[in-house]
Each structure stands twice: as structure tokens, then as C-alpha cells.
Image: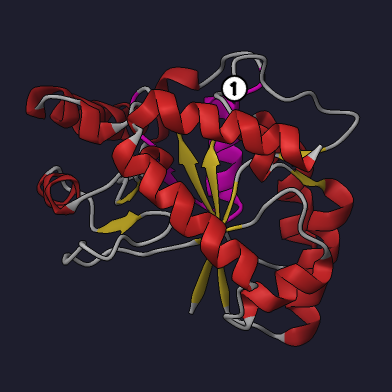
Amino acid sequence: MITLMYHGITSQNVKSPPDREAGAELYDVSVDNFRAQMLWLKDSDKKTILTFDDGEMNNYKVAFPIIKEFGFDAYFFIIVKKIGKNGYMGFQELKSLIDAGMTIGSHGLSHSILTNLKDSQIIEELKASKKCLETNLGIPINDFSVPRGFCNDKIIKMALEAGYTRIFISQRPEYLSLDCLPRIAVKTNWPLKRFQQALESHVPIGEIIGDAFKNTAKIVLRESGYNFLRRTLIYIIK
């Protein structure tokens, strides 16, 4: 089963958070495109898992009504320190999602790149975010989405030891050996045809080369260089 990764679902009526990280716009999907994608999924009867990272308010105000309209379920991975901040969902919205049958998971305490942190800091990101969500929502939190795609076996092992049972990542690195759920990142400039190709496991050669370059940049350039690359990509697609 294919798992899709969304971030912001944009609309003129709902502003994006003012403190987004570099390159966030690469993954914004307009409300019209999102509706067209959900309609296609419904009509094609494709078995797909929908996930949303970061916990932006547009997920609740824009994406959630469309998800309900088409009868889908989804995972929402929350940056705990962003809860209730300008442009992000609060606990009231998260509880409404739970009441509607959606799944809430952790996207870390601060959205830090875990591979940059000391073990004690990684544990804090994993355990404190889980505890905060469980305490305030009154449910077990079993799912974790690794922030920003920087992942290795050590991170997955520590997440499992922290009590998570399902670990979601973006693209799966070749060197990863432990079980996790890779996802396809839906991008802002995808027409419906490209979305359909993703569900049919067809990736244009240009994107294969671009993704390989991006994944190499994650390893070689680390966070600052990777952020520069994402800003550059934003400039190119505009």
C-alpha cells in the first residue's frame, strides 16, 4: 500500500504559519489540487494511506473537510512545541480530528533533525512529545514521523524503545535495515497526471536524478546546506 506525505494544504482564506522552515513551499498543495487528488483516489479505489506532517492549521480548516467528504482516514503528525501557535492546530482541533476517526502521531518536540542531536536530546524529542500528546489528548500515541527525512537505524531503534510501534519516514535510505513506513512526498508543482504516476509507482527520470541529488545533499551538506538547496529549488519552480 502506498503512503502519501502531505504538509500544507493552501487556500486564500487560511494563512500559512509565519515561522515555517526553509523550502516548506515545495510541499504546499493548493486546495483545488488536493480536492482533485482525493476525487481521483476515490474514483480509482486506490488503497492509500494519507499522512500530514507538522500540524498546520490549514490541515484542519482546509484538508480535513475534504478528507471527511470523501470518507478517508488520515494520520496527522504534530510538532508539539508548535501546538496552538500562530498557524498551527491547538488541542481542540486535534481532539476534533480524533473524534472523527483520524490518527494523531508525534513529529517530535521541536522538529529538530534527530541525527544532529546527542542521545539524551533524541530521547527528549521522542519521549516528551509522546507524553505531552498522550496527557493532553487522553489517548496512546503509537506513531512517529521522523522530522525532515534525516534518519538512520539508530533513530528508528530509539523511537521503538520510546514506545512507538510505527515509524514513518520520507524516502527510505538504502542503508536503512530496520522496518519503517516510507512515503511519497506530494509536491506543490504536481499536476494530476504526476499524482497519478506516483500511485502507479512511476517516477519521471528527472525526479529520480533530483531526489538522488537531494538525498546526497542531506548526507554531505547537512542541515544548513540542505536548507540552501531547498531555497534554491523554490526559486527555480517559481
Residue bearing the label numbered 1 = 20
Residue at image point 73% right, 58% down:
68
In the image, 180: left or right of 76? Answer: left
Q: Name the amino acid type tagged 1.
A: Arg
For disc 1, the neighbor class at 10 Å (few under 14, some 14 to 19, many from 20) is: few
In the image, 151: left or right of 86? Answer: left
State which region is magenta.
87-109
Where does residue 129 sit, x and y in percent of width and height? 30, 29
Where does residue 79 sit, x and y in percent of width and height? 44, 29
Residue at image point 61% right, 53% down:
100
Residue at image point 30% right, 42% down:
219
Q: Is residue 19 above or below residue 145?
A: above
The answer to whether one can see residue 35 in this image is: yes
In which quadrant of the rendered view does residue 203 lie? Answer: bottom right
Where does residue 196 sit, x and y in percent of width and height? 73, 76
Q: Is residue 35 above or below residue 194?
A: above
Is 149 contained in the magenta span? no
Residue in the foreground of this view, choosing between 161 and 152: 152
